Image (cartoon, rainbow, N blue to C red):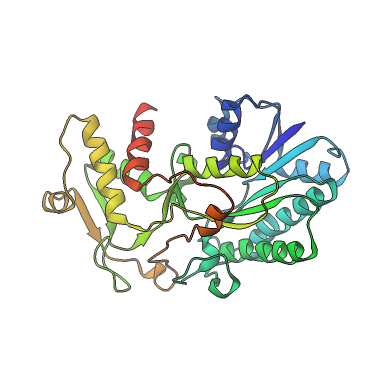
Amino acid sequence: MTIVVTGAAGFIGSNIVKALNARGETDILAVDNLTRGDKFVNLVDCEISDYLDKQDFINLIGSGDFDGEIRAILHQGACSDTMNHDGKYMLENNYQYTLELFEFCQAEEIPLLYASSAATYGKGTVFKEDRQYEGPLNVYGYSKFLFDQVLRRRMAEGLTAQVAGFRYFNVYGPQEQHKGRMASVAFHNFNQYRDTGKVKLFGGYDGYADGTQSRDFVSVEDVVKVNLYFLDHPEQSGIFNLGSGRAQPFNDVAVATVNACRRHEGKPALTLSELVQQGILEYIDFPDALKGKYQSFTQADIGKLREAGYQDAMLTVEQGVDRYVDWLISR
């Protein structure tokens, strides 16, 4: 039976397809929107059984074409642009589409693993999967929050099959190049350094010193491993934070990125202060457009993920970025 991956040509989706291939799985239906055709490169070295446009897929589901044909759906497809304020589009694309997949999966008793987001927490300081800590700051976060609320209600009524939502924190890693300005800090740091020999970070804001705003940066390698763990454990349902469980400052990402590049250049590693002193790391004024809409600190409480049985250690920024830079340079 077929495994469906939506957003399959995207960042996390294509990494999931590759990981499924590594397990010997090739009966994979890749679903995406390739209006922006450059994403196809993420699937070139993947083995899939078929490709469908996201609208064609949902239409065929509605007409019963896939009844009895699907083993599981890993739903990664969404608009993740936090600066897109088109609420009608966001709710149709992120909320309504997920709801239709959910109803189909429940009717057919098919596991559904889907991408939620840490954006559901907004400016909160506690990142725990509980309604009291949630308050999205943008319509993207709200579109994810809205479906999480549906899942909570339906879990209370009783599910017919597994449904697990993953609140992704700041994911970075291979195959995010098509995301443009929404790509990770590590990706932008790498390209800045390679193009100009410098990296620029936001200066102090919100009580934080230069470059010390901190996020939970999680490698796409760990994100994929968690998705496959839940695919193997269909008894586990719920909403789960998916981060590293630690907060690290943007300075750490810049230092790790530059030093990984310097390693390839045959140069010694530098400390943060040395990077600043030599003008390799610069700080720019915090943008007015982001003030009041910016998460200065995130750190996933991954206790619930651990309780579900996932025990593998998460990569640190230093480990994950080092591996990511190796991949970027190999392209």
Q: Is residue 21 above or below residue 57?
A: above
Whether residue 114 is visible, yes or no, is yes
Quadrant of the rendered image containing residue 39: top right
Residue at 16 percent of width and 53 percent of height: 276
Give the number of callouts: 0
Q: Residue furthest right?
A: 64
Q: Is residue 140 above or below residue 229?
A: below
Residue at 16 percent of width and 33 percent of height: 267
Whether residue 183 is visible, yes or no, is no
Q: Position of residue 223 (x, y in %)?
A: 51, 45
Residue at 73 percent of width and 58 percent of height: 96
Q: Quadrant of the C terminus?
A: top left
Quadrant of the rendered image containing residue 328: top left
Q: Position of residue 310 (x, y in %)?
A: 54, 47
Q: Is residue 72 above or below residue 102?
A: above
Q: Is residue 318 above or below residue 42?
A: below
Residue 205 shown left or right of residue 226 in the figure: left
Q: Quadrant of the N terminus?
A: top right
Residue 242 shown left or right of residue 157 in the figure: left
Residue 182 shown left or right of residue 280 in the figure: right
Residue at 13 percent of width and 50 percent of height: 274
Q: Position of residue 301 (x, y in %)?
A: 48, 61
Q: Position of residue 48 (x, y in %)?
A: 66, 27
Residue 149 shown left or right of residue 240 in the figure: right
In the depicted view, which residue is nearer to us: 301 or 60?
301
